[in-house]
Image (spheres, helix red, strand yellow):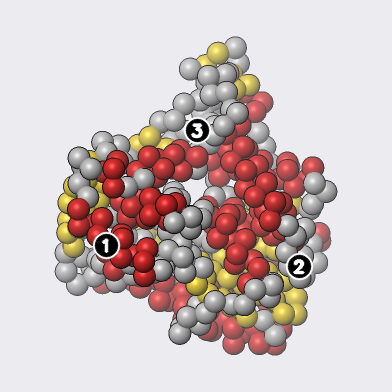
């Protein structure tokens, strides 16, 4: 409700997304991640000029935090987020980025953000201008975009991604996160056009175009590295993920990494795909089956002392990329930081619980409460030491990027 020029902001959940975000809660969430990195200590030989494409939430935000506060790097963040308008709060990614810039500047770190369509040629050109004028050559490019659609800047066609199986319909367990019901969901198979469009949106083409543009502008350093994020997961999620439309996009991402490594050979550079752990993100929340799997996984990994969120994952990845620990590569030359999730003992317990779980035992057999807590934190809710009953002044709600 509006009050004295401000507003009390409460979570309003619509399906798998929260349509409100709390600026002070988002800032606290960013602060928690920064504190974790600072507690772990400086990453020796880390990058000094970092471009993060898709920098406002989840793994992209964690990548920016680790680069800045783990390696004291200059960071340029690219994202497409909604500022506050007409008395409505901004998106969580907007508030995350405002908070990140504030904390970075207070720590004496250079940080700038560009809000717009990362798929467009115009934003690529603007990023290159900023790099040339203010950063120095880039030694790490992180590609962490997750978008439901993409407009090709050359032909103007807008493509849409879908989360569907390929070849035949799929029926499996999922959880209705609003009603806390474990039900079966049936998803019809994708058409060939839907497969093709999903690859256009979620595959490696735009990553390749970014690297080509940066190379042409000569803003990449010698020994430059670039990394894009992927997921494999267990067999229970394969029909809707690895063997589905998004899995085809990830295959394209793998092929793109090989192509880009060849392209970067003149800089002695390398392109990597990092296979990351299942975590609660705005993207993962939209995938049927996955929220139930994550709820089970959280319970098991927490009991074993293995649980990690985005920031712990990316700190481990950064140490590998900076050669402080060995690269954990699979037979497809992908970096695997999902190694703890995919441990045989962890997955054996997941499989056992998966067969048993239902609405009645959801709370007992999984950490659904932990899933919900993490989900709300994405939007700045449920953080300690935040007064959620307090009025948010309009100047805070309408916070701007520096």
Q: Earlier in the sequence, mark 1 or mark 3?
A: 1
Classify residue 103 by image quadrant.
top right
How packed mark 3 is, by other alpha carbons closer than 10 Å (few <14, some 14-19, many 20 or more), is: many
Return the residue nearer the eye: 28 or 197. Answer: 28
- Look at mark 2 in the image and give the residue it sits on: 44
* Residue 356 seen anywhere in this rendered image of the structure: yes
Return the residue nearer the eye: 59 or 94. Answer: 59
- Look at mark 3 in the image and give the residue it sits on: 382
Q: Kindly identify the residue that appears in the image at 72 percent across and 80 percent down.
A: 223
How packed mark 2 is, by other alpha carbons closer than 10 Å (few <14, some 14-19, many 20 or more), is: few
Dot 1: element: helix
Distance in Å between CA atoms under marks 3 and 2: 34 Å
Q: Kindly identify the residue that appears in the image at 25 percent across and 67 percent down.
A: 239
* Residue 68 seen anywhere in this rendered image of the structure: no
**Taking 335 as reference, is 284 above or below it?**
above
Q: Are marks 3 and 2 in contact (CB under 8 Å)?
A: no
Return the residue nearer the eye: 14 or 327. Answer: 327
- Look at mark 1 in the image and give the residue it sits on: 351
Please tell me the numbered disc located at residue 77.
none
**Taking 52 as reference, is 25 above or below it?**
above
Classify residue 141 by image quadrant.
bottom right
Distance in Å between CA atoms under marks 1 and 3: 30 Å
Q: Quadrant of the C terminus?
A: top right
On the picture, is 38 further left or further right than 274? right
């Amino acid at each position: 409700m509006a009050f004295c020029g401000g507003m009390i902001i409460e979570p309003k959940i619509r399906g798998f997304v929260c349509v409100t975000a709390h600026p002070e809660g988002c800032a606290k969430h960013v602060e928690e991640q920064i504190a974790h990195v600072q507690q772990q200590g400086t990453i020796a030989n880390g990058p000094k000029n970092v471009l993060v494409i898709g920098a406002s939430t989840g793994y992209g935000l964690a990548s920016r935090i680790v680069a800045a506060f783990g390696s004291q790097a200059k960071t340029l963040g690219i994202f497409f987020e909604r500022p506050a308008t007409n008395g409505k709060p901004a998106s969580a990614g907007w508030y995350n980025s405002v908070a990140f810039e504030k904390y970075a500047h207070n720590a004496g770190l250079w940080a700038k953000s560009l809000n717009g369509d990362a798929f467009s040629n115009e934003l690529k050109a603007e990023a290159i201008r900023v790099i040339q004028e203010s950063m120095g050559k880039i030694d790490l490019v992180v590609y962490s975009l997750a978008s439901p659609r993409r407009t090709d800047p050359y032909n103007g066609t807008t493509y849409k991604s879908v989360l569907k199986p390929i070849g035949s319909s799929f029926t499996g367990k999922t959880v209705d996160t609003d009603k806390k019901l474990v039900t079966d969901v049936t998803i019809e198979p994708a058409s060939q056009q839907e497969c093709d469009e999903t690859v256009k949106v979620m595959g490696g083409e735009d990553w390749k175009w970014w690297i080509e543009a940066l190379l042409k502008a000569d803003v990449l350093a010698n020994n430059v590295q670039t990394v894009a994020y992927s997921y494999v997961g267990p067999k229970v999620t394969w029909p809707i993920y690895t063997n589905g439309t998004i899995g085809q996009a990830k295959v394209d991402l793998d092929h793109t990494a090989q192509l880009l490594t060849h392209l970067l050979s003149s800089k002695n550079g390398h392109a990597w795909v990092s296979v990351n752990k299942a975590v609660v993100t705005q993207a993962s929340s939209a995938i049927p089956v996955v929220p139930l799997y994550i709820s089970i996984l959280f319970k098991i990994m927490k009991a074993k002392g293995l649980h990690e969120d985005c920031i712990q994952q990316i700190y481990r990845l950064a140490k590998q990329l900076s050669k402080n620990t060995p690269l954990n590569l699979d037979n497809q030359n992908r970096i695997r930081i999902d190694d703890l999730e995919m441990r045989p003992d962890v997955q054996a317990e997941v499989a056992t619980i998966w067969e048993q779980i239902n609405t009645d035992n959801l709370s007992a057999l999984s950490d659904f409460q932990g899933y919900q807590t993490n989900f709300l934190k994405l939007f700045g809710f449920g953080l300690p030491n935040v007064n959620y009953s307090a009025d948010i002044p309009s100047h805070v709600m309408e916070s701007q990027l520096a």
